[in-house]
Image (spheres, rainbow, N blue to C red):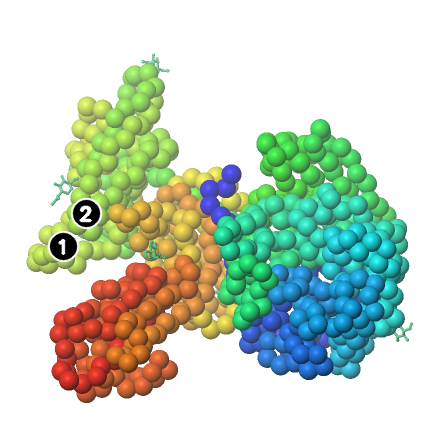
Amino acid sequence: MVRMLYWFTAILLLWTATGTVRGGNVTYDGRSLIINGQHKILFSGSIHYPRSTPDMWSSLISKAKAGGIDVIQTYVFWNLHEPQQGQFYFNGRADLVRFVKEIQAQGLYACLRIGPFIESEWTYGGLPFWLHDIPGMVYRSDNQPFKYHMKRFVSRIVNMMKSEKLYASQGGPIILSQVENEYKNVEAAFHEKGPSYVRWAALMAVNLQTGVPWVMCKQDDAPDPVINSCNGMRCGETFAGPNSPNKPSIWTEDWTSFYQVYGEETYMRSAQDIAFHVALFIAKTGSYVNYYMYHGGTNFGRTASAFTITSYYDQAPLDEYGLIRQPKWGHLKELHAAIKSCSKLLLHGAHKTFSLGPLQQAYVFQGNSGQCAAFLVNNDGKQEVEVLFQSNSYKLPQKSIGILPDCKTMTFNTAKFNSVGKWEEYNEPIPEFDKTSLRANRLLEHMSTTKDTSDYLWYTFRFQQNLPNAQSVFNAQSHGHVLHAYVNGVHAGFGHGSHQNTSFSLQTTVRLKNGTNNVALLSATVGLPVSLFVGAYLERRVAGLRRVRIQNKDFTTYTWGYQVGLLGERLQIYTENGSNKVKWNKLGTNRPLMWYKTLFDAPAGNDPVALNLGSMGKGEAWVNGQSIGRYWVSFHTSQGSPSQTWYNIPRAFLKPTGNLLVLLEEEKGYPPGITVDTVSVTKVCGYASESHLSAVQLSCPPKRNISSIIFASFGTPSGNCESYAIGNCHSSSSKANVEKACIGKRSCSIPQSNHFFGGDPCPGIPKVLLVEAKCT
Ligand SMILES: *[C@@H]1O[C@H](CO)[C@@H](O)[C@H](O)[C@H]1NC(C)=O
Ligand SMILES: *[C@@H]1O[C@H](CO)[C@@H](O)[C@H](O)[C@H]1NC(C)=O
Ligand SMILES: *[C@@H]1O[C@H](CO)[C@@H](O)[C@H](O)[C@H]1NC(C)=O
Ligand SMILES: *[C@@H]1O[C@H](CO)[C@@H](O)[C@H](O)[C@H]1NC(C)=O
Ligand SMILES: *[C@@H]1O[C@H](CO)[C@@H](O)[C@H](O)[C@H]1NC(C)=O
């Protein structure tokens, strides 16, 4: 299994919001929806407009688009829009038209699930409570009062969309609508009034003449021409299919996680599992998959249904805050791209299924002139298998599907993050003594040899022995800072000093050969010294090897050959020009001392950009040829976490697309685990006064801690959290004491008391406490 969660992000660029009209009449056949005469494989994502704020919509939709989403699906929330009978509300978060127009502006399609019973873990399933008091009311049944109000509301929404020309048939983005919602779950309870209600609802909807098809999810007897669709996590396995050969296979809800209720744990669904089931559904000629949710958001106010927590589907590809959640977002993006790369063939080719083994199948799509695309499925949840397909063999990890858009190259596997060729690697050569030009019969001091041209200095020697191959004890003592030992080309050990004591010794076992043995020791400095508690006599400070022994033999005074710096440094392979001077290979050897290279796009927006190197060890990183600094994630604090995980990439180093990222990794790292993140700085502020609150409570969002105190004043500061200044009375220990109490914590409480601030700064005057802090 992959050591770390993958993810490469490249969060997308701004794109030209084209406002292109992509609509046209929408019909369907047994293969797919047909938009403007064209069959389509569509990926859709649920984003519910009232679960975020209008200023977030554009960014959520553009992140969905960048993730390979074609359609944004939303419910329509009746009790939000008609809180009192006949009083309608479509402003702010309820501005449905604005939301659909935002989808249109970004060139995506929309699917409107009007319900109007929607469930959606939304209070009362979207039904306004006033319905309850209408005489004779029976919800969701062949019941006159219910049908009257349902038809009235559905018509109103449809007419609103029509008057704004939002249906595809009018040139708008809406290509699909839904009436009712998972009615089959409750239908039997209504006896004969159930089926007749289904027929009524379908006919009522169709008669509204939207020019686009309707679906009824989980309604296997949905009346023609309404399409029955599947909801769940495994529709490739569970869906009995459309109820007519002329209807396409549609998955309206692929649950990316699950809603959470008070008292229960978060439901986690892996990116691999989602990708497996989507690929299976498409392999079995499904043509439309909607992720429920793509962005869950927040149940603001009192909108959550009974016992549902306020955060909604935080584990979706975009988390509650609208931030890209990896690896889901990126893995699904790659899945969409792999499927889209052969979608014509999938839609128009002949479909065949073959067995490849007891638990393995091939789903193949063939064109008229020999084109071919295949999905190779391994249903075995326990082991990887090797299958033979069209005389080539393929390894399929456990429970995975490989996608071969040309029936030859597996460009995507649902269980593996990082598609082929994204990262490339180049192994820095290990120098041999014979090839070195600088020689000495002793161990040279590191800094005076490299002359500060590189962190790295190779110490090499070779020796003969006439002994059987065997393990021997290797021992090196170094003045600092870091040492990697290679014997006969094999990495044999790693040691390092620390800020307190740069000296260290490295003891390990090495395998010696009968014959010639080549030893290469890579010494590295981690910055030149400034002072070590005493800064005097800096010129006398030393680094590098002090003593080397193998078994009982001392090599300290021996014939050593030296190489200053690395080949990759000399060729500047971290620059665009230099990177062409060596041959990069497909990622996969996972050896130490490796250069890694990839391209990434600048994240959208203006937030600061940070490289998350949490999956790496120690080395240096370059962006477009500029070093962003050394990294050392494997050097842990006494608490067991890296001292620094995120590394700043100034926006000035970036172009919108195709930024060259090169890393030199000394140890072992997992580059597909690297992400390009944006840092959204959150500030928290609190105010307490004698008459108001006795303490300031600060609390950062999840996974963030207070990193600095921007402002703190115990005394008579003016203003409030929006704008403030120190007043006539101010305790000089305000900031220091708040820092002591809060830095590094997610939340803290600071009492508004003389005692806490070490005395009264102005006796007799009423004091307040105002604190603003930064969460990172
Ligand atoms: C949709 O179909 C109708 C009837 O066939 C036709 O009049 C209309 O022009 C079509 N609309 C679009 C956008 O193609
Ligand atoms: C080492 O190799 C040489 C040459 O192949 C051989 O003659 C000798 O016996 C070997 N020595 C041992 C200890 O295996
Ligand atoms: C520094 O580390 C070396 C090697 O581990 C040790 O011999 C030496 O005593 C240490 N020096 C100090 C000042 O701790
Ligand atoms: C890269 O190579 C091209 C072509 O040889 C040259 O024109 C350009 O100046 C080089 N760029 C840098 C930064 O060296
Ligand atoms: C935040 O602080 C908590 C202790 O309050 C600590 O366990 C956690 O590791 C910190 N997280 C970060 C990202 O610093």
Res 507 → quadrant: top left
Residues at marks 1 and 2 touching, judged by CB atoms closer than 8 Å? yes
Describe residue 631's horizontal placement relative to residue 203 as left or right: left
In the foreground, 316 or 469: 316
The residue at 32%/20% (across/down) is 470
The residue at 31%/46% (across/down) is 640
The answer to whether one can see residue 14 in this image is no
The residue at 51%/44% (across/down) is 587
Amino acid identity at mark 1: Leu
Q: Which residue is mark 1?
A: 532
Does residue 394 lie above or below 370 as drawn? above
Q: Residues within 10 Å of mark 1 (few under 14, many from 20)?
A: few
In the foreground, 371 or 583: 371
Describe residue 707's horizontal placement relative to residue 556 as left or right: right
Residue 730 screen position, x and y as percent: 19, 81
Res 21 → quadrant: bottom right
The answer to whether one can see residue 138 in this image is yes
Q: Secondary structure at mark 2?
A: loop
How far apart marks 1 and 2 lie (CA) works out to 9 Å
Does residue 214 lie above or below 752 as drawn? above
Residue 330 screen position, x and y as percent: 56, 55
Q: Which residue is mark 2?
A: 502
From the Cβ of disc 2, is ligand 3 less than 8 Å away?
Answer: yes
